[in-house]
Amino acid sequence: MKFKYIIFDWDGTVMDSAAKIVACMQKAAELAQIEIPTTTQVEHIIGISLHPAIKQLFSIDDRKADEIVLHYKRIFLEQDKIASPLFDKATETLILLKQKARLAVATGKARRGLERAWEHTNTKHFFELSRCADEAESKPSSDMLLQIIKEWNIEPQQALMVGDTIYDMQMAENIGMPRVGVSYGVHDKAELLKHKPLSIIDSFDMMQIFV
């Protein structure tokens, strides 16, 4: 299948940022004097908006979650002065995709974080639309996707969602949007396959087959 509209998740799909997210979350837990989660536990909630992700990860109330959110944001901002790398061949592939399709981002990052990532990597110009965690309901709600396709004035079946987590797959599946999983992100291939993606790709440059 070929698509003229492609929507990407960011962390774990375009940017290789999982290790930084895990390290910052573990440090935030240490500062909050709460049990430090494992790498696998943190990776499981990557993609969800920050506050609900922290509540889910630690099984805590809103007050304690607010505390950890503050710790995490401060730590991440300090660590993010050095940008995480894009995945191999991402920039070259985005150049090719942009020539044939309209591109957007649907991310669990806050707007400020996405803009900072775009600035660090000089990639903002590839994406004509984006929705962030502070502008829509958290994944796996389809709210981000619905907002984007409303602006494009298209039906869900006309766009392709690309992501590395089950939350990306679920948000597309909920509205009948075609989807592609990536095997190099944080969630297991077997888990992604449960949501019936068109394909699971092993490298970013394989996106070229969909345009």
Image (tube, rainbow, N blue to C red):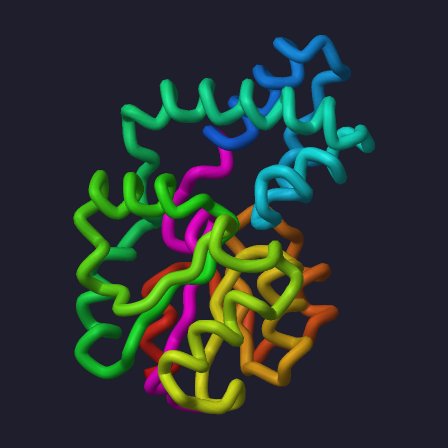
Q: Residue at x 51, y 71 (%)?
A: 145
Q: Residue at x 44, y 81 (%)?
A: 150
Q: Is residue 9 in view from this perspective?
A: no
**In the rendered image, which quarter contains the N terminus?**
bottom left
How many labels were placed on the picture?
A: 0
- Closer to us: 117 or 130: 130
Residue 45, given in percent of the width and then of the height, sits at 66, 43
Residue 158, relative to residue 36: is it above or below? Answer: below
Q: Residue at x 28, y 26 (%)?
A: 82
Our reading of the magenta stretch's main secondary structure is loop
Q: In the rendered structure, does residue 5 fall within the stretch colored magenta?
A: yes
Q: Is residue 122 left or right of residue 97?
A: left
Residue 56, given in percent of the width and then of the height, sits at 75, 39
Q: Is residue 53 left or right of residue 102?
A: right
Q: Residue at x 31, y 50 (%)?
A: 88
Q: Is residue 117 left or right of residue 145?
A: left
Residue 6, relative to residue 155: is it above or below? Answer: above
Residue 2, given in percent of the width and then of the height, sits at 39, 89
Residue 164, given in percent of the width and then of the height, sits at 54, 57
The residue segment tinted magenta is 1-19
